[in-house]
Amino acid sequence: VQLQASGGGLVQAGGSLRLSCATSGRTSSRNFVGWFRQGPGKEREFVARINRLGGITDYTDSVKGRFTISMDDARNKVYLQMNNLKPEDTAVYYCASGVSLGTYNFWGQGTLVTVSS
């Protein structure tokens, strides 16, 4: 299974970015796809996930109402639309996948998001 995240960049506070995660490999290993982030001097944290089989989504509280995770199964892509970005959203964002809920066995390289105030 391979995952490749892209779409990061520099944006002003209040702006938007859309991250993409291109996935490939065994389908069952991509039942759950999640986005995580690691800010400067911080531990990696969960941001959002989607259940590929049912489309069920979940978000960490700090991004609810601002971020939306979605998938295009035909293109094997998962997206993270990020609106109303804040400086505290600055981080390297990673996508990851796994067979079961809460288990992420496969990780992509990160994409850097920098939000200026």
Image (spheres, grey):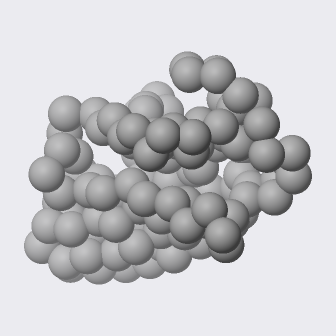
User: Could you tell me residue 112's position as x and y percent?
Assistant: 51, 64
User: Could you tell me residue 27's position as x and y percent?
Assistant: 79, 46
User: Could you tell me residue 29's position as x and y percent?
Assistant: 77, 37
User: Could you tell me residue 114's position as x and y percent?
Assistant: 36, 67
Q: Is residue 77 above or below residue 27?
A: below
Residue at the spot x=26%, y=56% of the render?
A: 67
Left/right placement of residue 10 relative to residue 43 reads left
Is residue 47 in view from this perspective?
no
When asked about the image quadrant of residue 107, the answer is top right
When asked about the image quadrant of residue 74, the answer is bottom right
Q: Which of 18 and 24 lies nearest the eye of the viewer?
A: 24
Tag count in the figure? Answer: 0
When asked about the image quadrant of residue 70, the answer is bottom left
On-image quarter of the C terminus: bottom left
Is residue 94 in view from this perspective?
yes
Left/right placement of residue 107 relative to residue 68 reads right
Q: Is residue 25 above or below residue 81?
A: above
Residue at the spot x=71%, y=28% of the render?
A: 99
Q: Is residue 30 above or below residue 112?
A: above
Q: Is residue 111 above or below residue 105?
A: below
Residue located farthest toward the front when viewing the structure as drawn? 54
Residue at the spot x=28%, y=34% of the render?
A: 60
Q: Which of 107 and 90 lies nearest the eye of the viewer?
A: 107
Residue at the spot x=70%, y=42% of the render?
A: 30
